[in-house]
Amino acid sequence: MTLYERALEEGREEGELKTKLDTARKMREFGDTIEKIILITGLSIDQLRENGIL
């Protein structure tokens, strides 16, 4: 994998994480349960805590 390809992959992964975190925040605003947020987004409870969602 070239440096360029690696950078593209890292950017894609960061974008996916941001989207999941945005979704989790919105779900929390709408009163969804933590269990449902974890199930739908695939994020861990630690990731939710680290990003201020819990």
Image (cartoon, rainbow, N blue to C red):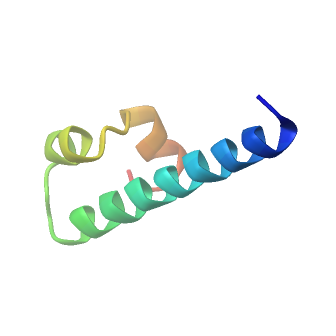
Query: Looking at the image, is 19 positioned above or below residue 47?
Result: below
Q: Is 32 left or right of 9, judged from the image as shown?
A: left
Toward the viewer: 9 or 17?
9
Query: Looking at the image, is 50 positioned above or below residue 15?
Result: above
Question: What residue is drawn where x is 22% and y is 48%?
Answer: 37
Question: What residue is drawn where x is 39% and y is 54%?
Answer: 20
Question: What residue is drawn where x is 49% and y is 50%?
Answer: 17
Query: Looking at the image, is 29 positioned above or below residue 49?
Result: below
Question: What residue is drawn where x is 32% and y is 62%?
Answer: 23
Query: Looking at the image, is 4 positioned above or below residue 45?
Result: below
Q: Quadrant of residue 36?
A: top left
Residue extending farthest right = 3
How many labels, in total? 0
Residue extending farthest top = 1
Q: Quadrant of residue 26?
A: bottom left
Toward the viewer: 33 or 22?
22
Q: Position of residue 7 (x, y in %)?
A: 76, 46
Q: Is 53 left or right of 30, judged from the image as shown?
A: right
Q: Quadrant of residue 27?
A: bottom left
Q: Position of residue 3 (x, y in %)?
A: 85, 38
Q: Is 2 left or right of 11, judged from the image as shown?
A: right
- Quadrant holding the N terminus: top right
Toward the viewer: 40 or 15?
15
